[in-house]
Image (cartoon, rainbow, N blue to C red):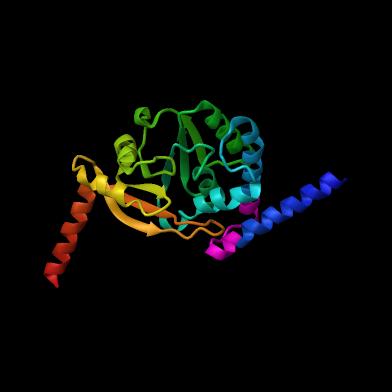
Amino acid sequence: MSNLIGSIKSEISHATVLNNGLNSAGWLLSAEQQQRLLQYVSLLDKWNKTYNLTAVREPVRMIGLHILDSLALLPHVGLARTMLDVGTGGGLPGLPLAIARPDMQITMLDSQQKKTVFIRQAISELDLKNAQVECARVERFSPLKKFDIVVSRAFAELSNFVNNAAHLAAEDGLMFAMKGVYPHDEMARLAENSAMSFQVSAVIKLYVPQVDGERHLIVLKKVKQQADEQTEEKIKESRI
């Protein structure tokens, strides 16, 4: 009986933590979506004991460090219809975003089979019709259609991200790199390499409730796309 009471109290506490975080950020999710997010946290905690999916061991900390951190992309995905989550690990940010954006088709990619097995099970248990997972190395992945957004929390270096994953972005697609502190050195190294097909278009400071430390979103656009936009802007200015 005491274990049951403790479990119920824990579920209520987690629900409150999640709801408070969502309210703080102004992200409106339904009760069903919030319940699915909590169910995902429960699955992640359960499988993590065997599969070592994340270094975060406490479910209550997973809410901030994983769920809310992933959802921080919500204001920035716009009208994108498809997204590829590269090096997804335990399904981050892909699964939380798939729950929050049922209108977006999200593919998660990881080269470790144990992680994709977990994600496949999570997709099934969470009944997500807009999510799928593939087990492959990013540089060898060749989908039938490319993606509006290619995102990753996993790459340690921006240049590696662009070099390995740029071929997966649609013609007018974007690449999103989720970072902690402002990556001055990484951005400088990327800018120095003129052969890179994508370069930094914007750096957005993210607000993530319940998470200490800085978080930034690095938005990358194709070099040709940036040049075309600059040309269009000059044409508009010349007409004024």
Q: Is residue 161 above or below residue 232?
A: above
Residue 57, image x and y in percent?
62, 42
Q: In the image, what residue occupies the spot 47% across and 60% down?
A: 207
Instruction: Indicate the quadrant where residue 39 lies.
Output: top right
Dividing the picture into quarters, in which one does residue 238 lie? bottom left
Q: How many marks?
A: 0
Along the horizontal axis of the image, is 222 left or right of 153?
left
The region drawn magenta spans 21-35
Residue at the spot 83% in from the left edge and 50% down from the top edge = 5
Compared across the picture, whether 120 is left or right of 232 comes to right
Residue 52 rendering spot, x and y as whole percentages = 58, 33
In depth, the one of 15 and 130 nearer the eye is 15
Locate the N terminus and report the quarter of the image it occupies: top right
Q: Nearer the viewer, residue 93 or 191?
A: 191
Whether 34 is among the magenta residues is: yes
Q: Is residue 97 left or right of residue 177?
A: right
Depth order, front residue of 232/112? 112
**Residue sitting at the far bottom:** 240
Depth check, front residue: 36 or 151:
151
- Residue 237 in percent (x, y) is at 15, 68
Q: Quadrant of the C terminus?
A: bottom left
| 78 left or right, relative to 55 | left
Q: Is residue 110 above or below residue 209?
A: above
- Residue at left offset 30%, top offset 48%: 185
Classified by dominant secondary structure, the portion drawn in magenta counts as helix
Q: Is residue 26 located in the magenta-colored stretch of the structure?
A: yes
